[in-house]
Image (cartoon, helix red, strand yellow):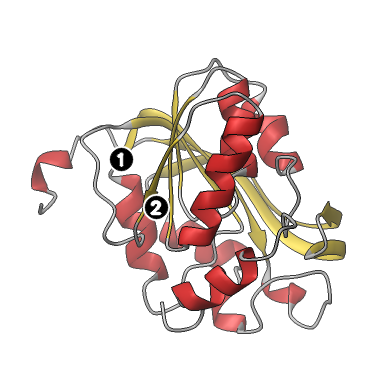
Amino acid sequence: MKEYPADFWNKMYGADEYRYGTKPNRFFKQQLDKLKSGNILLPAEGEGRNAVYAASQGWDISAFDISKKGRAKALRLAKERKVSITYELTGVLEFRSETQFDVIGLSYAHFPASIRNKAHKHLLQYLKPEGIVIFEAFAKAQLGNPSGGPKNEAMLFSVEEIKEEFPQLEFEFLKEVTIQLSEGNFHKGKAEVIRFVGINKMFKNHLSFIPI
């Protein structure tokens, strides 16, 4: 991911502080709390705040990120909170699993524009029929705001792009909204975000076609 390589994130997460805090993303928590616990995939999980919260609520966690520093802090947080998480060090297109998941949680997972569509379709292979995606990320209108997010507009989202990149989902909720972020020192202030909850309506299991 040339826009934000592993070295960038290792430097970011190398500090003692949790850059985005230790509490779960508010929208993620709100939506997850409505669901019966099962197994959940958390791509680009960073320092583990969402993974640790979900584990505390009885979810079976599979997470990954490209940052070894982020992974180390996530595992440390899990140990402090006395929960167990599985956390791999891998890129999104390299991720493989024999499992399909009840939920995929994407919280500010801004993949490079050059691979983003492919990355989302790759991840959706691992979502069960009727499985749910919980998503929050910065909208294109966020560009220039000091509250966080990529500085490359192509890595930000529009509602139209979401519909194109997640065609197998039926959206229970999909909206661009203005919120006040308070997630550590790096997500703070007024922000323009896109949120959605989508249900997988693609019933055919494609896992057998995934190259190993």
How far, Cα to Cα, is label 2 from label 1? 15 Å
Residue type at mark 1?
Answer: Tyr
Q: What element carries label 2?
A: loop
106 to the left or right of 125: right
Residue 116 numbered mark, or none:
none
Mark 1 neighbour class, 10 Å CA radius: few under 14, some 14 to 19, many 20 or more: many
Residue 45 appears in the picture as rendered: no
- Work out whether residue 39 or residue 177 is closer to the camera in this orientation and state it: 39
x, y percentage for residue 45? 53, 51
Residue under pointer 2? 167
Q: Quadrant of residue 208?
A: top left
Q: In which quarter of the image is residue 49?
A: top right
Residue at image position (66%, 28%) is 81
In the picture shown, does residue 125 fall above or below 16?
above
Q: What element carries label 1?
A: loop
Residue at image position (58%, 41%) is 76
Residue at image position (44%, 62%) is 164
Camera-side mark, 2 or 1: 1
Earlier sequence position, callout 2 versus callout 1: 1
In the picture shown, does residue 127 fall above or below 153?
above
Residue type at mark 2?
Answer: Pro
x, y percentage for residue 88? 37, 48
Residue under pointer 1? 126
